Image (cartoon, rainbow, N blue to C red):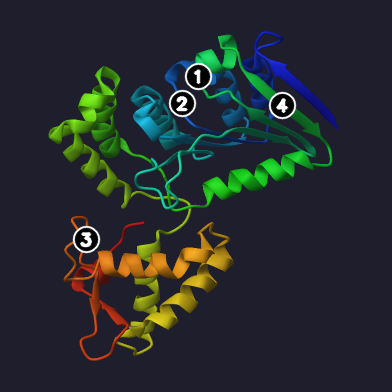
Amino acid sequence: MAIHILSNLDYPIGNIINQELQNANSARIAIAFLKYSGLKVIEKSLDHCLKNNGNVEIIAGLDFKTTDPQSMRYLIQLQKSTPNLKFYCYGDKDVNKNNIVFHPKIYLFEKGRETTGIVGSTNLTRGGLLTNFEANVIFKENKPVYFSQLEAIYNSVKFTDSVFSPDEEYLVGYSDVYKAFLQNEENALKDKGIQKTVNQIRKREEFLPGTVPSLKSLIIDIIRQKNKEGLEFVPLQTIYEEAEKIVAAKNSKYKMDTFHNSIRGELNKHEVNSKHPDSMSLFIRSSERKGYYSLTDKGKKYEGR
């Protein structure tokens, strides 16, 4: 094992990331924000890794609309022609399930039995990789200990229903919001047109592929299965039990201490008579038996995440 602590003043972390990426069989990156300038720094190494059948995942945060549309467009396009690249975004704190700001900087590289983990302050930007005053810890191990701990944190990010894969349609709306925030964040937060666009892209997120199903799609799948078994209305307790089994099997990172409350919240939000502004009218509550639910026609046809 070798452990190094570096600032960019000692040796740019971008140089190390390029070296590791070029030779990696697997590379996984989770950063708070992403810039096209950062992608240009690692572009040649990324291309080399992908062409040599390396698998690359990048998860970028969207809080404060700091990740730029150009970087997203680059990865969306590259992903189309390169199936061994996966690009995801982590929804901002207003819509994710734990209401926290997404702020990690994790880089994981594997080459056979050799592993390299990097954690610190560097986002995937030119400044972060080359010129900013940054501090990062690098773990190089043949028997991963610290790497495994970082990998567990990375997976706790990846396997949440806040993670989705953006497409061009999503990017159109996001670009408008990004420009408005860039000009004046305070005014953008008050602008009704921008807020309408924000709501539109949030709704678009619901239908984009991710790494795990959303809570409402989990509930829909459970009710669909019980309908097939001949049960028209499904008791809430059964929904709880089946959802817990699925989450445990998929190792999905839900907050289990409030899991039942979250399920009830989704049922209430998307119930056919709900007054919630974002209700999709997916569920019907039985008028004869308290705590029993079935699906509306919309629910039966729902195909989102």
Q: Position of residue 119 (x, y in %)?
A: 65, 30
Mark 4 or mark 2, whichever is nearer to me: 4
**Pointers 1 and 2 in contact (CB under 8 A)?**
yes
Q: Earlier in the sequence, mark 4 or mark 2?
A: 2
230 horizontally vs 191: left or right: right
Q: Residue 279, labelled with which disc? A: 3
Label 1 element class: loop
Callout 3, which amino acid?
Ser
Q: Residues within 10 Å of mark 3 (few under 14, many from 20)?
A: some
Q: Earlier in the sequence, mark 1 or mark 4?
A: 1
Residue at (40, 75) in percent of width and height: 222
Label 4 element class: strand
Label 2: which residue?
34
Query: Mark 1 and mark 4: span between their CA atoms?
Result: 18 Å
Callout 2, which amino acid?
Leu
In which quadrant will I find the C terminus? Answer: bottom left
Asked whether 112 or 96 is in front, the reply is: 96
Q: Position of residue 105 (x, y in %)?
A: 58, 31
Q: In which quarter of the view is residue 198 placed?
A: top left
Query: Mark 1 and mark 2: span between their CA atoms?
Result: 6 Å
Q: Residue 125, labelled with which disc? A: 1
Label 4: which residue?
137
Callout 4, which amino acid?
Val
